[in-house]
Amino acid sequence: MLLKRIKIGAYIVIAAFLILGFRLWQLQIMEGERHKRLSEDNRLRIIKTPAPRGIIYDRNGVPVVRNVPFFNAVITADSLMALDINAIAELLWLTRQDIEAKIRTSNNSPFVPIRLKQGLTFQEVARIEARRSDFPGLSVETEIKREYPFGKVGAHVIGYLGKITLSQKRNNPHLNDFPPDTLIGQWGVEALFDNKLRGIPGEKVIEVDALGRELHLIKKRQPVKGQNVQISIDINIQKAVEDAFGDKAGALVAIKPDSGEILALQSLPSFDPNLFSMGISYHDWKSLTEDKKKPLLNRAVQSQYPPASTFKLITAIAALEEGVIDATEKITCTGRISYGRWTFGCLRREGHGSVDFHRAFVESCNVYFYEIGRRLGIDRIYKYATALGLGKTTGIEIMPIRERQGLIPNANWKIESRDMPWYLGDTFISAIGQGYVSVTPIQMAIAVAAVLNGGYIYKPTFVLNDRKLINTVRIKPETVEIMKKALYGVVNNPSGTGQKARSEITAIGGKTGTVQVASRRKDLMTNERIRSHGWFIGAAPVESPEIAISVFVEHGGRGGIVAAPIARKAIDAYMKSKEQRVQGVKE
């Protein structure tokens, strides 16, 4: 019996040794590599360090953003137990509640210092450095902050930074390699060229003990600075536009007619991208998004308005190309025309008398354009307007903006959308850019550029020397010459509606437009909400254009009074920049 018990005990011991041996074999042989990796993970920590972003330069080499040092007071998590909160609060000019809140909201990682105060002044840095020995674990952390030296000027183009969002990480897994607090481009050029600008983050590998305390540095890789980017914008034009608009709302777009390069794109009111440099506060974000003036709205591409008399450029091209008028033919303007029970008026109530094409365009005679609109019909107006880029998106890449396409109506559109037939009266008001017609400021800049360059439409771009032809419209050379003289006359003839765009530096040609919001009598009142919108489109030098421009002033009044001088200041700024570039090359 005793022998039997001994045998059973022996079997149990042998079985236990076999099980233990198998388990050791499994852990060391079969799963050895996995456990080795887990052990290494517990022993080693990888800490990512952000890379400085590349600099953005305008077409003249002027930096429109820069990187500047930004100082934070930080403390290591393992020194919190011995921390005298009242004393450190006094040192940092904070309250005890501020310090406790920072500690509570930290991520509790022993490898990520807790930021007690951000954006230290040099005086505060000196105070902390002088008393660091009194506060073990306290130090000054230096970061690189994005600074926008021109503030609101060009903000809708340059853009701003923001923290990486969860959706961005899902769409681009590569972003998981970046430190959690990394700021990337979220708007404008900062977003458009983010892949180039953000660089490659660095990292350091450290060995830690069982309590997570750093023992020593194993390996360190320095971050790689992002690439610099030069864009087509001329910051001198942007500044001139900001000053010229004053406190008015609106938009301006200036492009090179021979390439589509955007020289200026301004939307007002604007915002200060410096608010986003280190992550925007809830209060500042709420203030921007709830502002009734809508500073985040890019009016150049996201707002659409009736083009008013600037649309006469399109109607004129259609009429000349289709041969429905001869430039020398005269039409009598009595100040109005009647159609059924409706009366359609002219800008000059007493009428212009007998006018040919040149005078009708220069003085913006509505009656003349009612007549050529009648001869053309809406479908031919639609044909040329859409061919010149109206009623469709331009394809401009300005993240994360989704541009509006405007509307160029025709007979089918009205039947399908309004369940109503198209009337001749609809053609009258469409021919002068009113009624259902709506456009964006960037579309009008592209249209006037295409008319003057002979019918070539380029995709608008912020990239230098990136010309992409997207459409060609057949416009006879003689038509182009007639339009150049007419546009020049609008600005430079004594009777022209755009005389306030006249420049002493260059020959500007253009067309004004006024979108009437209320009756003429009410329009003279001071209530801004019912004051007319003002337009000006044009180019310079008109004989061989280097810059095409579109200006829209929201509730500013007549285009010839408010929009024309803004266009002149922008064009003059471009010409002065060009002269400085030429002189710089010669020197």
Image: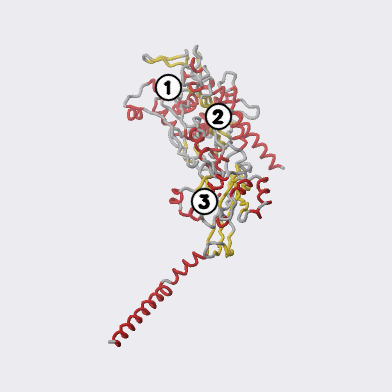
Figure check: 435 above or below 37: above
Which residue is labeled 2 in the image? 538
Q: What is the CA distance from the residue labelled 3 to the residue labelled 1?
A: 63 Å
- In the image, taking residue 106 as reference, residue 437 lies left or right, namely left
Which residue is labeled 1 in the image? 429
- Label 1, secondary structure: give it: helix
Between discs 3 and 2, the one toward the N terminus:
3
Q: Position of residue 45 (x, y in %)?
A: 53, 61
Q: Residue furthest left?
A: 1
Q: Would you say residue 121 is visible in this rendering?
A: yes
Q: Residue furthest bottom?
A: 3
Question: The C terminus is located in which quarter?
Answer: top right
Nearest the eye: 468 or 40: 40
- Label 2, secondary structure: give it: strand
Nearest the eye: 440 or 86: 86
Nearest the eye: 507 or 127: 127
Q: What is the CA distance from the residue labelled 3 to the residue labelled 2?
A: 56 Å
Between discs 3 and 1, the one toward the N terminus:
3
Which residue is labeled 3 in the image? 106
Question: The N terminus is located in which quarter?
Answer: bottom left
Quadrant housing residue 278: top right
Q: Residue furthest front?
A: 2
Q: What is the CA distance from the residue labelled 2 to the residue labelled 1?
A: 22 Å
Q: Amino acid at mark 3?
A: Ser
Q: Position of residue 207 (x, y in %)?
A: 55, 64
Q: Amino acid at mark 1?
A: Ile
Q: Position of residue 154 (x, y in %)?
A: 57, 37
Q: Amino acid at mark 2?
A: Gly
- Label 3, secondary structure: give it: loop
Figure check: 131 above or below 476: below
